[in-house]
Image (cartoon, rainbow, N blue to C red):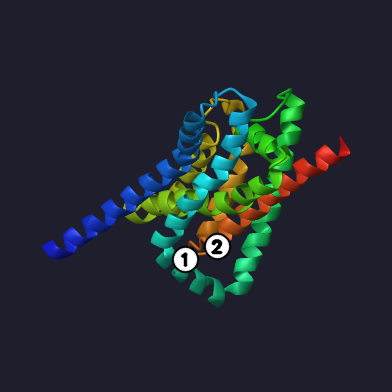
């Protein structure tokens, strides 16, 4: 490899990692920063009901530019994976259906297991999701929950983290699956309620496996994630109706 080729490769690796951290940071902090700025401008207290409303809108408004930038800078990745989808459409559908069923089954088993060992309630992340869906702005919140989050999170945890481990570090695909699974799960438990980690490990593991077996086609985990979030939102609304 010539010195020019080495510099190009180093620049490519650096850009790959830099873009990952920028996307992750924007995804984690953009909504809360937007909500804080808006609340400060209106002199709204952080623990008030009015701030909760602002936070809900900030979640949707803050993730939209993040998603737009992610789609723009990752457009070539989506184009490549769309070609994979068209060439292997039946396999793609099979992976999506199998993955969605596996996530549902494993999540059901985990909930039964938690009931048997006496772990009640759910994670703070899930409680926030339920509060958003059940609020009077629930229909608005379905947009970031069902559409925005699956795209952004799968770019972060599958396309970038999985990609860095497998393609840049040259580790095995199973290492990439396991590491991305753990990181995905921990990132959904930043409040420290790690007793609920089994709620996220199966979902992340299945999406990682389907991503690998589909030849790293990002549309597969995105669609599985979309189905999972949609069913979760529907379940929350149905339970409220029954209550």
Q: CA distance from mark 1 to mark 2?
A: 8 Å
209 and 81: which one is in front?
Answer: 81
Residue 148, relative to residue 183: is it above or below?
Answer: below
Q: Look at 58% across and 25% down and name the residue there.
A: 193
177 and 31: which one is in front?
Answer: 31
Which quarter of the rendering shows the N terminus?
Answer: bottom left
Q: Could you say where residue 84 lies in the image, as x and y percent from the top left?
A: 50, 72
The local crowd at label 1, few if under 14, some if 14 to 19, many if 20 or more residues have their Cα within 10 Å, is: some
Q: Look at 58% across and 22% down and name the residue there.
A: 47
Splitting the image into 4 quarters, where does residue 163 fall?
A: bottom left
Residue 134, relative to residue 212: is it above or below?
Answer: above
Which quarter of the rendering shows the C terminus?
Answer: top right
Q: Residue furthest right?
A: 242
Residue tagged 1: 78
| Mark carried by residue 219 | 2
Residue 43, relative to residue 105: is it above or below?
Answer: above
Disc nearer the start of the sequence (1/2): 1
Residue 14 seen in the current view: yes
Side of 139 where 48 appears, left or right: left
Splitting the image into 4 quarters, where does residue 99 fall?
A: bottom right
4 and 30: which one is in front?
Answer: 30
Q: Could you say where residue 68 lies in the image, as x and y percent from the top left?
A: 47, 57
């Amino acid at each position: 490899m010539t010195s020019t080729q080495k510099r190009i490769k180093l620049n490519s690796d650096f850009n790959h990692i830099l873009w990952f951290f920028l996307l992750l940071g924007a995804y984690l902090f953009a909504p809360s920063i937007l909500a804080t700025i808006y609340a400060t401008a209106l002199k709204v207290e952080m623990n008030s009901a009015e701030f909760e409303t602002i936070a809900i809108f900030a979640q949707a408004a803050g993730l939209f530019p993040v998603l737009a930038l992610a789609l723009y800078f990752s457009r070539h990745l989506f184009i490549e994976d769309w070609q994979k989808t068209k060439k292997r459409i039946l396999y793609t559908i099979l992976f999506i259906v199998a993955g969605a069923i596996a996530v549902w089954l494993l999540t059901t088993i985990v909930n039964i297991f938690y009931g048997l060992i006496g772990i009640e309630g759910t994670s703070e992340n899930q409680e926030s999701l339920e509060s958003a869906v059940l609020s009077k702005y629930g229909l608005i919140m379905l947009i970031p929950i069902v559409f925005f989050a699956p795209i952004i999170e799968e770019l972060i945890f599958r396309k970038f983290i999985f990609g860095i481990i497998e393609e840049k570090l040259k580790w095995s695909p199973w290492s990439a699956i396991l590491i991305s699974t753990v990181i995905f799960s921990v990132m959904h438990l930043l409040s420290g309620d790690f007793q609920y980690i089994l709620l996220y490990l199966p979902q992340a593991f299945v999406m990682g496996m389907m991503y690998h077996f589909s030849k790293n086609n990002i549309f597969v985990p995105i669609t599985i994630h979309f189905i999972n979030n949609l069913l979760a939102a529907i379940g929350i609304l149905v339970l409220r109706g029954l209550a």
